[in-house]
């Protein structure tokens, strides 16, 4: 590995061997070109260099190793984190693990996806529990699980399963990692599971959550109060913020096993929203919810490749000089840069086909006019 080579280029080079056959690699490059269009609509019907049916076969039937692709992306995410820590040994930024559930709305019938498609929070579709790692300026999608409806493991149980995929090397060190989650993950089982792994937790909490003394969370009068929630033999610090998005102000509560003080805990609790920014980007720019594949394998590959497009663009942004980086970059510009850097031949062939069609049309005009 050449350490001076761009991280996005190293990731792309390591991904290509996942496709041993030439036709699979060509289909991958065409689909990556669609993903990096940045419009959020990487539909196979938009491919011109390859037929839509070829892209569909690549996703649903082709014999390439999806697990190997995921391992390559996760290994690069791990190396990126460790490289960042090596460059800042005395001011090592804290690792923050964000978990949340995102819903991918779907209409129509998906026979093979029947046990994946459910209604949750009034959204009918597929629901993913996602683990997202943040450390300083690093934003790394790590893993996801599909929620399979009532009677199956809950989103909180799936989140605990995702935490087991994080290497112990990332959880070690003087600065304990923190896990951030919203109120859907406030169960006693989840909080205990997080704390047992040596993590600190900052989690949203319902205003009606009962305390050991019989009160509810909304009865607290001072931010930063230390209380014991009912059923949880753990002292927790509770704070809140007021949201003024609607006509009536809305009070949102957050609690942590750390005594951070009322104002600081309220500020730390807002860090959970970074995963929402990721969801917005990967859906709006890289088409996470635009899948229309008929098989679970095709859908799973669609999600993995969509996440890969995000990771390539994020690493591309990290490779820019510090003075050119943005807090939250223009993902359209980044996608265009990666697209032109890694799959230029696909763009040339697509443009050549369009030129050939234009020339054929122009040549036919005199004959048709006479």
Image (cartoon, grey):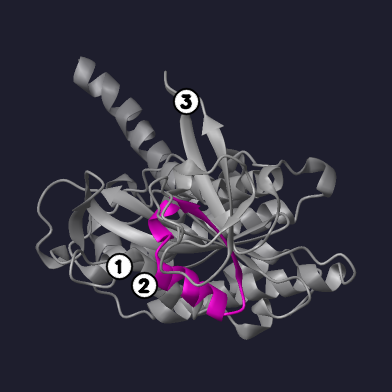
Residue 134 percent across, percent down from the top left: 63, 60
- Report, in whole angstroms, how far the alpha carbon at label 3 lies from the one at label 2: 32 Å
Q: Which mark is residue 154?
A: 1
Q: Residues within 10 Å of mark 3 (few under 14, many from 20)?
A: few
Q: Nearer the viewer, residue 38 or 62?
A: 38
- In this rendering, position of residue 296 left or right of residue 114: right
2 and 1 marks in contact (CB < 8 Å): yes
| Residue linked to disc 2 | 157
Q: Residue at x 30, y 29 (%)?
A: 361
The residues colored magenta run 183-205
Q: Residue at x 39, y 39 (%)?
A: 354
Q: Nearer the viewer, mark 1 or mark 3?
A: 3
| Residue linked to disc 3 | 249
- Report, in whole angstroms, how far the alpha carbon at label 2 lies from the one at label 1: 5 Å
Q: Secondary structure at mark 2?
A: helix
Q: Nearer the viewer, residue 13 or 229?
A: 229
Q: Nearer the viewer, residue 47 or 92?
A: 92
Q: Secondary structure at mark 3?
A: loop
């Amino acid at each position: 590995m050449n350490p001076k080579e761009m991280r996005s280029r190293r990731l792309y080079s390591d991904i290509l061997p996942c496709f041993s056959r030439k036709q699979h690699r060509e289909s991958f490059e065409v689909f990556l070109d669609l993903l990096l269009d940045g419009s959020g609509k990487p539909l196979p019907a938009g491919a011109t260099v390859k037929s839509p049916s070829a892209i569909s076969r690549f996703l649903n039937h082709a014999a390439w190793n999806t697990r190997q692709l995921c391992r390559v992306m996760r290994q690069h995410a791990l190396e990126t984190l460790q490289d960042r820590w090596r460059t800042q040994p005395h001011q090592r930024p804290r690792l923050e693990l964000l978990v949340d559930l995102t819903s991918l709305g779907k209409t129509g019938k998906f026979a093979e996806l029947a046990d994946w498609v459910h209604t949750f929070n009034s959204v009918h579709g597929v629901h993913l529990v996602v683990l997202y790692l943040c450390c300083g300026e690093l934003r790394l999608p790590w893993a996801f699980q599909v929620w399979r409806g009532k009677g199956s493991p809950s989103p909180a149980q799936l989140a605990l399963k995702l935490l087991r995929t994080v290497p112990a090397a990332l959880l070690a060190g003087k600065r304990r990692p923190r896990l951030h989650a919203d109120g859907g993950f406030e169960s006693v089982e989840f909080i205990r599971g997080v704390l047992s792994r040596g993590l600190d937790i900052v989690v949203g909490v319902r205003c009606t959550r009962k305390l050991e003394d019989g009160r509810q969370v909304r009865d607290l009068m001072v931010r930063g109060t230390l209380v014991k929630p009912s059923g949880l033999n753990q002292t927790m610090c509770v704070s809140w913020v007021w949201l003024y998005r609607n006509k009536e102000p809305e009070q949102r509560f957050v609690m942590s096993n750390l005594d951070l003080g009322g104002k600081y805990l309220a500020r730390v609790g807002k860090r959970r929203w970074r995963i929402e920014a990721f969801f917005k980007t990967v859906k709006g720019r890289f088409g996470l919810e635009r899948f229309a594949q008929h098989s679970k394998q095709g859908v799973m590959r669609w999600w993995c490749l969509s996440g890969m497009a995000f990771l390539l663009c994020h690493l591309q942004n990290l490779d820019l000089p510090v003075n050119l980086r943005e807090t939250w970059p223009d993902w359209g510009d980044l996608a265009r840069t990666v697209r032109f850097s890694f799959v230029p031949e696909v763009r040339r062939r697509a443009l050549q086909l369009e030129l050939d069609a234009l020339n054929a049309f122009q040549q036919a005009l005199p004959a048709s006019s006479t």
